[in-house]
Image: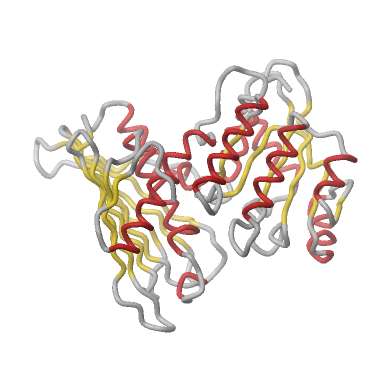
Amino acid sequence: MSASSGAMARFAVIANGRAIERSALPQLPPAELFAAISEGVEAGLRVASFFGMADPDPDARRRIQQLWGVPEVFADWREMLDAVALDAVDINIRWDVGLSPTRVEAVTEAARRGLHVIIAKPLAETWEQCQEIVSVARDAGIKLGVDQNSRYAPAFYGCRALIRGGALGPLLSASINYHSALGRQHTNAFDAVHDVSVHGIDILQSWFDGAPVEVYASWSRRVDGIGSVLAAIMRFDDGANATLIYDFATRHRRQFEFIAVGESASADGLQDQELPGPSRMLRATLRYGPHEPRGVALELPLQYALSPQSYLATRLDVLQVAGTPREPWASGANVLRTMRTLFAINRSLRTGLPADVGSEYVE
């Protein structure tokens, strides 16, 4: 499929009960979804509705077919790949509960058929599996994008635009604080670092355009039924640093707060999320302030919410580069940097010591 060919993208989803209940896909009628994607795609590329969906959950299959009008649904994703002519697949298989090897298998089978892949975050459970997924995609010559959708949240994306445009000067420091308010993050049986904190790690590295050289992380004491708080600091080789606070105890707010400090100016803002309610972030702010004159600040307008637009963006990230030499912004190779840092943070949490973030770090 080429971005200049005028071809229609035939798209399918591989899930495991999450297509409806915990979907990374926005709950929009298909005409709205693909019209929104098509608006941003390079001239000549038309994006069609879903051609198939595979999920072992019969209720999920029935409901997604009702919602999307998907022409064909399957219990087994392998059967779908054999039966339906496709250009790309969205792999939304869980990374935990022993299913990460299935993710690797699904990417391998899609790549063998020449299908481009969008895969839900986090990339995989182990470093070896992350490397294998990226290697399989590279060797097959397909596009591999990771659904690190928080990169596209308006305030985070806007902050990155200021950084890349030179408005802040070279970065000195940045920090992201997240307050979860509700959810599985408050239970002891959930790997909140791997599943949730990966967002903040990825956002920071999209700002610094690279991985830190060292991290140190610590959990507060955990209170059963309430939660705990993760704190991490990252050191970069140019003398910059970054901090990450993931608060899984607070109950009265659900939001991101952040600041990025450069040599010339700073930017701060927030992404505010509904509480209670579904995972939709509706309020976003971004403010820019030069170091001189003191006290001057400009609030910048933001034109969309995190959901569903950021989910559309991650899919467009892959579809718009299909058939070109370019790679998605959140490509598998790019997100390997995020995963290296995540595994180093987990190692620091286990040992209580700083951890190096090596280019070939193995968990």
Nearer to us in this view, 18 or 105: 105
Residue 163, image x, y percentages: 30, 32
Q: Is residue 29 left or right of residue 360?
A: right
Quadrant where the N terminus is found in the figure? top right
Quarter of the image holding residue 112?
Answer: top right
Q: Residue at x 72, y 40 (%)?
A: 89
Quarter of the image holding residue 239?
Answer: top left
Nearer to us in this view, 283 or 61: 61
Residue 297, image x, y percentages: 21, 42
- Count of number-bearing discs: 0
Residue 129, image x, y percentages: 57, 46
Residue 360 visible? yes
Nearer to us in this view, 238 or 168: 238
Residue 259 visible? no
Q: How was the colour assigned to the protein in this rendering?
A: secondary structure
Q: Residue at x 35, y 35 (%)?
A: 210
Is 262 drawn above or below residue 75 in the view shown?
Answer: above
Q: Residue at x 74, y 29 (%)?
A: 114
Q: Residue at x 35, y 62 (%)?
A: 246
Which residue is outermost to the left?
Answer: 293
Residue 275, image x, y percentages: 48, 70
Nearer to us in this view, 279 or 77: 77
